Image: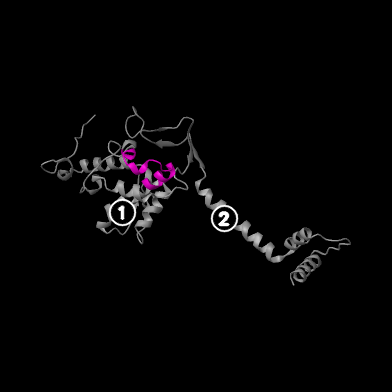
Amino acid sequence: MTRIRLTVVVLAALAMAGSVFAGELSLADAIEIAFANNPQVTAAQAEVEVTEHGVRAAGSASWPTLAVNGSYGSFSGDVLYGRFIPGVPGDGAMPVDPYDRNATAAVELKQVLYAGGAIDAGLLKAMLADGYFGKAPPKSTGTEHFNLAWINAHAEVHGLDPADVQCTLAELTAVTVRDAIVPSDPGDVLVCGGGVHNDHLLSRIRAHLPGVPVRSTARAGLEPDWVEAVLFAWLARERLAQRPQDTRGVTGAHNPVLLGTIEGP
């Protein structure tokens, strides 16, 4: 029965291939021809190729990306270009001689350090036990507390793949951001600072805040990298408006006060 079925398959394959063999055909040749001309096998091979392309496309997320951008502008010498120039009286408006040109260019190379990494539950739990996360706001810290020595002080980190450590640190950030803002019942989360450029981090914050839009402050008209500049601009505006600031809960001041002084030229 097996021989009859094989003969039928081979004959069908030969018929589809349009081939005529005058001599004897070995079993290996017959199987090869059958596989090469069987439409089910061809379809399965195509599905395998599609899957392999999908795997490569998914892996491309870990490839370095290079972005280049620039701008150029020029102004004719017949117009007045109102700008502030040190040492020029008034508003600084002056003829542009003969052309005023400015050009900017930027090249950015990005590489996901934790591509392919996995969250280590033990390390994440140990890091979340740090006393800082349990303190009530307002609070602030930086690399004086969270640094490489702090990471290496956790026994769970030793022996882990560096990509897993990086991935776990990103998850630590996302979880602590969620824990800090959920009590305020946010309807919208605007992100600024360097973390806004970390696509993986933003995706994890979104995962921990289902139903809450998480987006860059750029979508609201504020450049996310201008955190300190915007803060000082706001403080200057408040000072010029003579509005005292209540920093008692932050600096230990006894009363709301005007921050800074206004000095003339």
Which residue, as the protein is rendered here, is positioned at the far right? Answer: 22
Numbered disc total: 2
What's under tag 2, amino acid-wise? Gly
Left or right: where does residue 6 sit relative to residue 186? right
Q: Which residues are magenta?
A: 150-169
* Residue matched to label 2: 54
**Percent from the top left, x then y, of residue 106?**
48, 37
Q: Is residue 257 left or right of residue 102?
A: left
- Callout 1 amino acid: Arg
Indicate the quadrant where residue 40 lies.
bottom right
Residue farthest bottom in this picture: 1
Label the magenta part by its dominant secondary structure.
Answer: helix
Q: Horizontal and vertical percent for residue 179?
A: 28, 53
Q: Residues within 10 Å of mark 1 (few under 14, many from 20)?
A: some
Disc ID at residue 146: none
From this view, report whether residue 188 is shown above or below residue 236: below
Relative to 50, 155 lies left or right: left
Dot 2 or dot 1: first in sequence order is: 2
Q: Is residue 203 left or right of residue 136?
A: right
| Residue 145 appears anywhere in the view | yes
SS of the residue at dot 1? helix
Image location of residue 161, percent across then percent down: 43, 43
Question: Nearer the observer, disc 2 or disc 1?
Answer: 2
